Image: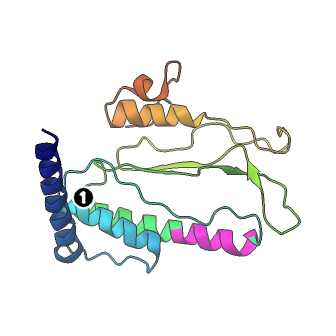
Amino acid sequence: SELDCLRRASGDALRSAEEIRRLATDVRTTVEYPATGLAGALRFVARAIDSDLGARLFFVSLGGFDTHAGQDVSHPQLLAELGGALEAFVKDLDRMDRTKEVLVLAFSEFGRRLAENASAGTDHGAAGPVLLVSGALSGGLHGAVPDLGALADGDLRYGVDFRSVYAAVLQDWLEADAAGVLGEGVEPLGHLFA
């Protein structure tokens, strides 16, 4: 019945909350993380991985990249926060000997235009970055270096369709049906995983 389903869901939620509470207090690391929001979130993810919580996907975010103004100050700070948090997280994965079991997929929800606007920032553009981090990757850069002389209405032309990266992650990492998620006709980007 619906009431039994609700009781089971409530019980599962309470058990999950207790496990998360335990993670927050019991699981420790020797790796020093920067004192930033992203680093704190990745520290928690590392704790969950270290405790074998059982989750296969985690999502954390770093906001602030919508730099329409003052980009020369904010953008380097954001990249430093991203770099510092990822460095600590990878050190923690190394400590656990789990770098080949974990894949970090960092992406931007939108690109930036190349030209600076009147507020010392950049406006939304077409191409955007995707960064993958794992000991299971073959490594390297995929796609051609953007041609700054061949823009499309002031935007970079993308060299790799982000859906092909997602398809490769779905198919080759998560062993999921990429076509079922992304639709037919999206070819997985090859040579990502060693």
Q: Quadrant of residue 65?
A: bottom right
Looking at the rendering, the stretch of residues picked out in magenta corresponds to: 71-81
Residue 31 in percent (x, y) is at 31, 75
Q: In the displayed orientation, state which residue is furthest to the bottom.
A: 35
Residue 70 in percent (x, y) is at 76, 72
Q: Is residue 172 left or right of residue 117?
A: left
Q: Nearer the viewer, residue 175 or 147?
A: 175
Q: Nearer the viewer, residue 64 or 91?
A: 64
Q: Is residue 5 left or right of residue 116?
A: left
Residue in the image at 35% along x and 78% along y? 32
Residue 73 inside the magenta-drawn segment: yes
Q: Is residue 124 left or right of residue 52?
A: right
Q: Nearer the viewer, residue 90 or 68?
A: 68
Residue 5 in percent (x, y) is at 15, 43
Residue in the image at 16% along x and 64% along y? 19
Residue in the image at 43% along x and 29% along y? 181
**Secondary structure, magenta segment, majority class:** helix
Q: In the displayed orientation, state which residue is furthest to the right.
A: 118
Q: Which residue is mark 1?
A: 49
Q: Secondary structure at mark 1?
A: helix
Q: Is residue 191 in sight in this rendering?
A: no
Please state which amino acid type lies under the numbered disc 1: Ile
Residue in the image at 52% along x and 24% along y? 186
Q: Is residue 186 above or below residue 46?
A: above
Q: Is residue 127 in sight in this rendering?
A: yes
In the rendered image, the quadrant that contains the C terminus is top left
Residue 52 in percent (x, y) is at 17, 56
